[in-house]
Image (tube, helix red, strand yellow):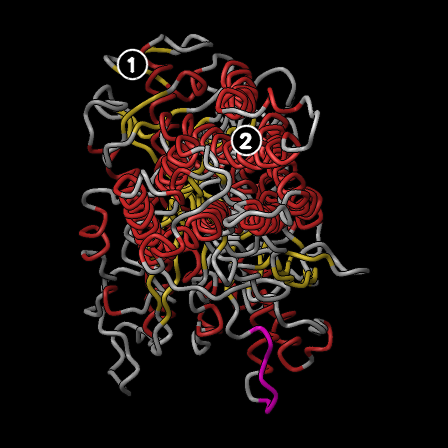
Amino acid sequence: MNGTSQVVSSLVRLLLSSFTFSMKFCSRNILLRTSLKSHTLVFAINEINKNPKILPNVTLGFHISDTYYDARMTFRTALDLIFKSHMFLPNYKCATEKNLLAVIGGLSSDTSFHLMDVLVPNKLEVPSVYRMVPNENLQYMGIIWLLQHFRWTWVGLFVVDDNSGEQFLKILEPLIFRHGICSAFTKRIPKGNLMEDLINQFYDSSEIHISFPDCKASTVIMYGESLRILRLRTFMHSQDSGNTKNPLFGKVWIVTTQTDFILTGGTRGWDFQMFQGTISFAIHTKEVPGFREFLQNIKPARTERDGFLQNFWEQAFDCSFPDPGMPVMDDDTCTGEETLETLPAGLFEMHMTGHSYSIYNAVYALAHALHAMVLAGSKPKSKAVGNSVKLQSLQPWQVISSQQTLLISMTDDYMVSISFNNSAGETISFNDQWEISGGFDIMNLITFPNNSFQRIKVGSVAPHVADRKGITISENKIVLPLSVCNEYCHHGHEKKRKEGEKFCCYDCAPCPDGKISNQTDMEDCFKCPEDQYPSKNRSQCNPKIINFLSYEEPVGKGLASVTASFSFITTLVFATFIKHKDTPTVKANNRDLTYILLVSLLLCFLSSLLFIGQPGKVTCLLRQPTFVIIFSVAVSCMLAKTTIVSLAFMATKPGSRVKKWVGKKVSYSIAVFCSLVQLGFCTVWLSTFPPFPDLDMHSVNEEIIVQCNEGSVTMFYCVLGYMGLLAISSFIVAFLARKLPDSFNEAKFITFSMLAFCSVWLSFLPTYLSTKGKGMVAVEIFSILTSSAVLLGCIFFPKCYIILLRPELNKGLWFTY
């Protein structure tokens, strides 16, 4: 070696996990599954060797070995890496020109662990396991978040029947249960290492017995390395020709990063329709500049026997290279001019997959680690040759790495501290758990009839996020079925647990009265806010209508019209009495009390208008007190009239002492006193618990009633009770005086009016209490108008009849105070 160039052959060796039909055909049939990864390794090493900024004057070499998914072959390959010869000579350093410094392992975790047993001398002294994929727990949570995102609660599980499969179930099953998801079934795929096992199972699929008593699980989670999963595909392929529709078709498959869909030559005839729409978790990848062009320029040389590339070419294009110097005999001869772009994705992909991207980054991580050792002078001390560093003195256990499980054993923690930007523009670094930092891509598999497929990125799982915000999904790119034990409960229904079944299986019960559910699959219905009410189908809350007895609606208009009519009639009666004020009919039984009674009745009619329209502070404060005070004045006048009539006839008896009580002063005193008592009740009411505007949200389901809260209900019924007491007292006195002789005895008319008045208000109470909202207000207005009209009609209609139609009777009254 000279000082300008130093070749470190076999610096990096790649162990790519693959499989073969049988041991004697292994040289050909491993290639399709490993070719892209192998080309990625070559591409990365070529880039590094051409880059003067990384390991200048050092040329990296590599060697590719296969483990065949077999533990024995893995140990055999590991020993071959250590002793570098066809003979195992423990404790002897042979083939020094093959200086092994690192190992990039395969996709299988078992492969990495087997390598660790042989290659890593002491796993506890230094960090020896570096992973080129993110933490596995992130993938578990990504699966949970994905299921939650699409609301899949009834899923099936397919796992390889080995230690890794059991570990997968041990972690995932409690997780899905804890997040409200149920497993419809769990099927284990028998373990098998060699392709000849698959060929045997193709003809005898009884090893994998798959029964589906419940086919409602539209989503199936699949875990296992590619060769193991191929056993399931073998079974499915053998069932395709049957008449029975296979229950696994039409499912959504969720596969983990371990699974790769690249076929081998022996399986190139199989299609991917079974996996249409598959959602897979993939190691995050990004297109590396120049990689596609690198693949496009790969051509096998006809003059040179590159066994690896030629064997790959023959398997990929289903052709063969003739022996040198022999003529071309048939059409299946490889020309070497075929292009990799014409191959379907099932055989070869022209872009860097997640697995290839991790190999690419692993090579660069090792190169940067070695470069850091060179710059630091390295430990142990390296010997300089010119301007270069002699790396042969490094021992094999000083740098050991793998792809999925990156194995590193270094005296200095160069790998821990390595952080670099790759040519794709991403920063590559390791966390404190010796795992590469980053998340997962979520890919959707689109299949085509020509056995090809396309992987479309539809989302990602971000690290360092503890909830469902860590997953992003582009739903517009995928269409997926339901995967539940039963159909979702629609709006207006809630879940009802089925006895004896898993919690993911339930019935859907309609929401109870007054509750709704506005989302599918709700656990419980809920009540609407106070200002809203449930729709008829109980699926949403509608805003309540603010309601009160207004002048615009028919009832309000009708009552206002009646009020105006009776007020006008009362005014006409009052005018008539003023015009004929000197007639006996008007003067009879205290003309002034008659005037007061007429004014009171007019105000009673008008007071009903306080009950129409939107209640406010002033109207609520005035409506009930005004009404009861005016009515009390009217009834007090009636009581005063009947009392004076009774006292007058008692005073006519010889020697009666009652004569001094007969007069206007006594009648005024009775009217004023009785009215003042009611005024006192109202004063106490307004000074303690006065009425106020209020919103009734509950009386009418679809309305918010704007009403007047009476404040103190006790005081409200007290003033009504007192008014009733005055009416009853007036009725009793008038009833006793009804037969007294007189040309015009007013007492009998007062008796009828008080009887009708009491009947109206006795009917008012139960009706008032049984109605709600504006109906209650309408009942009270009706009672006010009716009772006032009764008094007006019974007392003043007979008098008006005499005054206007029978004037000859308007004379000779016996009692005219």
Q: Is residue 770 visible?
A: no
User: Which residue is drawn at the image coordinates 42% and 65% (left, top)?
Assistant: 277
User: Which residue is drawn at the image coordinates 60% and 22% (left, top)?
Assistant: 661
User: Which residue is drawn at the image coordinates 52% and 19% (left, top)?
Assistant: 676
Query: What's the amino acid at mark 2?
Result: Ala
Q: Residues within 10 Å of mark 1 (few under 14, many from 20)?
A: some
Residue furthest out toward the bottom: 243
Of 62 and 682, which appears nearest the observer? 682
Residue of label 2:
640
Q: CA distance from mark 1 to mark 2?
A: 136 Å
Of 764 and 54, which appears nearest the observer? 764
Percent coordinates x, y for residue 698 in the rendering: 54, 44
For the image shown, how many numbered marks are present on the structure? 2
Above/below status of 330 relative to 53: below
Percent coordinates x, y for residue 597 in the rendering: 42, 36
Label of residue 385 in the image: 1
Percent coordinates x, y for residue 228 in the rendering: 60, 60
Q: Was residue 245 drawn as part of the magenta stretch in this picture?
A: yes
Percent coordinates x, y for residue 712 in the rendering: 58, 25
Magenta stretch in the rendered image: 242-248
Asked whether, in this view, residue 619 is left or right of residue 187, the answer is left
Q: Earlier in the sequence, mark 1 or mark 2?
A: 1
Of 335 and 816, which appears nearest the observer? 816
Please identify, in this view, whether the residue under mark 1 or under mark 2 is nearer the observer.
Answer: 2
Residue 229, picture quadrant: bottom right
User: Which residue is drawn at the image coordinates 44% and 21% (left, top)?
Assistant: 415
